[in-house]
Image (cartoon, coloured by chain):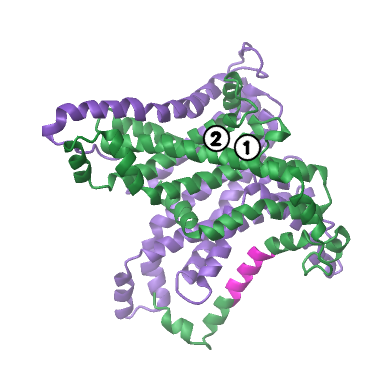
Chain colours: A green, B purple
């Protein structure tokens, strides 16, 4: 687009409107987030009269109490265990399947792939009651695996599609040459495909991680013990206990979204590329 | 999906390599198929089966009641409210969120100082957990401590409890939905804009088209595939919406802000009415699948 004249013509009213509009949207997005972070530094009384501004007196106690509580770290630990297991299993299972679909021709291959991609069409919620009964009958209720396995199953469709597309771009002269030299498919997968596919593995891993880290419905249905709760469940319990002590709740929210925001700032490129590419190419 | 791939292995090694391929087939495919079948496909089938029973989830289902659960669901006022709310979410996504996202994308796809920072800021709500977002906004809307309340009070008015009134609860939820998701759609459009063929736009400019003509007759038509995709995600997303509603209103007051999934949760799962809940699940499943296939056939034929 011809943007040069726009950015260099300071008196064009269009520029002014544009800046005004962007500013308004930025305020709309940023104010709730800033108010949350700052709210955690206020006392309840100050929050009531001054919800927007900087705290007159910075109340570090709210944050410190949470940071020194066992509860906060336990929630994060549970979330980390569940997300890490989900990501690891998804990457292993999906990359194996994607490799087969990309490099091995067999009868029914495209049919099986279509079967797996059915998973893209509906949310886990549709079958969550039978899923609950299945997990209960397997004896996995109230365990990490009871959350992890369904999460992996529901993330397979998208992961396999993304990985297969990437694997197919690996030139198959490489595979031919390797096979002629006596390398097996499995060794090729392990020593050539996977190392070459780091970018797409990172992308798929990021999508899966963010989804699992933020998940609420499956853990809510599958877990009953507070000690196993991931943070979205834990924070709802916390909110229930401190129903209108908003300064504490806001501090808790801030501390629980902090890992997400740090991860986002560190891995912006992967996350943006992953979440939008995952969507576009699915 | 895709066409059949050409055989990879050259003829010379077909003998030994077939063994290799068989090993791969036997070792690499079953885990995915097993997990997917066990935790995705079978539960959907079971939902259809359970939906014909009145069952609390314990023992075996024995009390066969045929299609009664579906009748009960369709007779519940809250179901139609939930359906209406999903319709509202879709309407707001199409009429407010999509134009907003597109406008911002057109502005921020250009390079100027701060563009990247603004993109990141606008995308940030999308990566926050729905639960956290819902809690943040239940503070924003809180009638005693919230941001909205203090604005109201600044004008000397009595602060409303937006989430506690059947008139405003859904409106409040809709605003949060736009807040959370417009950045994602904006990023879709920015990605599309950056991969557009610039020569088409230049050609239009050289031929004397004004900026707005170029936009209207060249850029927007080139974005149609992305717009269709964005609409698709908005609709599928609306049908899944749950996490965001729970911390805000739990679907209330008086079911006025339920979505299909929160209705399913409140009436099926939390009361362990397996048959009734499964019937809702099946209805939701049919809606999603019918929609996805129809939409793909009608609007996304070439993709």
Q: Which residues are magenta?
A: A20-31
Q: x, y percentage for residue B103? A: 51, 67
Q: CA distance from mark 1 to mark 2?
A: 9 Å
Viewer-side residue, A10 vs B71: A10
Viewer-side residue, B243 vs B206: B243
Task: Answer whether labels 1 and 2 touch (C-beta < 8 Å).
Answer: yes
Question: Is there any visible trace of residue A189 in the rendered image?
Answer: yes
Q: x, y percentage for residue B249? A: 73, 45
Viewer-side residue, B15 vs A19: B15
Q: Secondary structure at mark 2?
A: helix
Against B82, residue B281 (above or below) is above
Local packing at callout 1 (Cα closer than 10 Å; few below 14, some 14-19, many 20+) is some
Q: Is residue A26 shown in magenta?
A: yes
Q: Quadrant of residue A246?
A: bottom right
Q: x, y percentage for residue B224? A: 40, 58
Q: Secondary structure at mark 1?
A: helix
Left/right placement of residue A164 relative to residue A73 reads left
Question: Is there any visible trace of residue B257 in the rendered image?
Answer: no
Q: Residue at x 82, y 42 (%)?
A: A241
Local packing at callout 2 (Cα closer than 10 Å; few below 14, some 14-19, many 20+) is many
In the rendered image, which residue does mark 1 sit on?
A217
Q: Is residue B80 shown in magenta?
A: no
The quarter in which the N terminus of chain A is drawn is bottom left
Against B233, residue B21 (above or below) is above
Residue B142 badge: none
In the rendered image, which residue does mark 2 sit on?
A124
Q: x, y percentage for residue B63? A: 64, 12
Against B193, residue A126 (above or below) is above
Mark 1 or mark 2, earlier in chain: 2
């Amino acid at each position: 687009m011809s943007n040069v004249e726009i950015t260099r013509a300071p008196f064009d009213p269009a520029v002014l409107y544009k800046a005004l509009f962007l500013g308004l949207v930025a305020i709309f997005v940023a104010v709730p987030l800033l108010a949350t972070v700052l709210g955690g530094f206020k006392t309840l009384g100050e929050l009531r009269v001054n919800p927007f501004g900087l705290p007159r007196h910075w109340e570090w106690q709210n944050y410190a109490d949470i940071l020194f509580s066992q509860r906060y770290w336990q929630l994060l630990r549970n979330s980390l265990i569940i997300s890490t297991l989900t990501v690891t299993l998804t990457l292993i299972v999906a990359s194996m399947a994607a490799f087969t679909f990309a490099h091995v021709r067999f009868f029914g291959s495209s049919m099986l792939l279509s079967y797996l991609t059915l998973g893209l069409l509906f949310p886990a919620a549709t079958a969550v009651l039978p899923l609950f009964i299945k997990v209960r009958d397997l004896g996995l209720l109230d365990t990490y695996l009871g959350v992890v396995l369904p999460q992996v199953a529901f993330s397979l469709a998208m992961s396999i599609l993304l990985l297969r597309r990437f694997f197919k771009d690996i030139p198959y002269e490489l595979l031919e040459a390797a096979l002629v030299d006596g390398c097996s498919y499995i060794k090729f997968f392990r020593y050539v495909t996977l190392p070459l596919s780091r970018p797409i593995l990172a992308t798929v891993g990021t999508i899966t991680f963010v989804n699992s880290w933020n998940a609420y419905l499956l853990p809510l249905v599958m877990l009953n013990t507070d000690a196993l709760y991931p943070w979205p469940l834990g924070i709802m319990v916390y909110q229930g206990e401190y129903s209108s002590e908003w300064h504490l709740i806001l501090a808790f929210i801030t501390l629980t979204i902090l890992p997400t925001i740090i991860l986002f700032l560190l891995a912006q490129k992967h996350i943006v590329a992953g979440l939008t590419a995952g969507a576009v190419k699915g | 999906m895709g066409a059949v791939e050409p055989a990879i292995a050259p003829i010379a090694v077909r003998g030994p390599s077939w063994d290799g391929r068989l090993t791969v087939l036997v070792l690499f495919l079953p885990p995915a198929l097993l997990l997917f079948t066990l935790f995705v496909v079978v539960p959907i089938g079971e939902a259809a089966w359970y939906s014909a029973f009145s069952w609390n989830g314990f023992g075996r289902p024995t009390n066969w009641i045929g299609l009664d659960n579906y009748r009960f669901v369709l007779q519940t006022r809250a179901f139609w409210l939930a359906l209406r709310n999903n319709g509202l979410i879709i309407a707001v996504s199409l009429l407010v969120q999509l134009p907003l996202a597109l406008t911002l994308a057109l502005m921020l796809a250009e390079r100027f100082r701060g563009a990247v920072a603004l993109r990141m800021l606008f995308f940030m709500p999308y990566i926050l957990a729905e639960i956290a977002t819902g809690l943040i906004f239940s503070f924003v809307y809180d009638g005693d401590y919230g941001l909205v309340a203090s604005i109201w009070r600044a004008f000397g008015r009595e602060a409303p409890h937006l989430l506690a009134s059947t008139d405003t609860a859904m409106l409040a939820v809709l605003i949060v939905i736009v807040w959370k998701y417009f950045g994602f759609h904006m990023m879709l459009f920015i990605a599309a804009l950056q991969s557009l063929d610039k020569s088409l736009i230049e050609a239009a400019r050289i031929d004397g088209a004004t900026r707005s003509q170029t936009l209207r007759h060249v850029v927007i038509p080139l974005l149609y595939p992305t717009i269709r995709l964005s609409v698709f995600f908005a609709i599928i997303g609306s049908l899944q919406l749950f996490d965001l509603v729970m911390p805000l209103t739990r679907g209330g007051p008086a079911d006025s802000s339920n979505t299909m999934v929160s209705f399913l949760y409140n009436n099926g799962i939390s009361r362990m009415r397996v048959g009734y809940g499964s019937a809702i699940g099946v209805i939701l499943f049919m809606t999603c699948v019918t929609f996805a296939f129809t939409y793909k056939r009608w609007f996304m034929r070439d993709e």
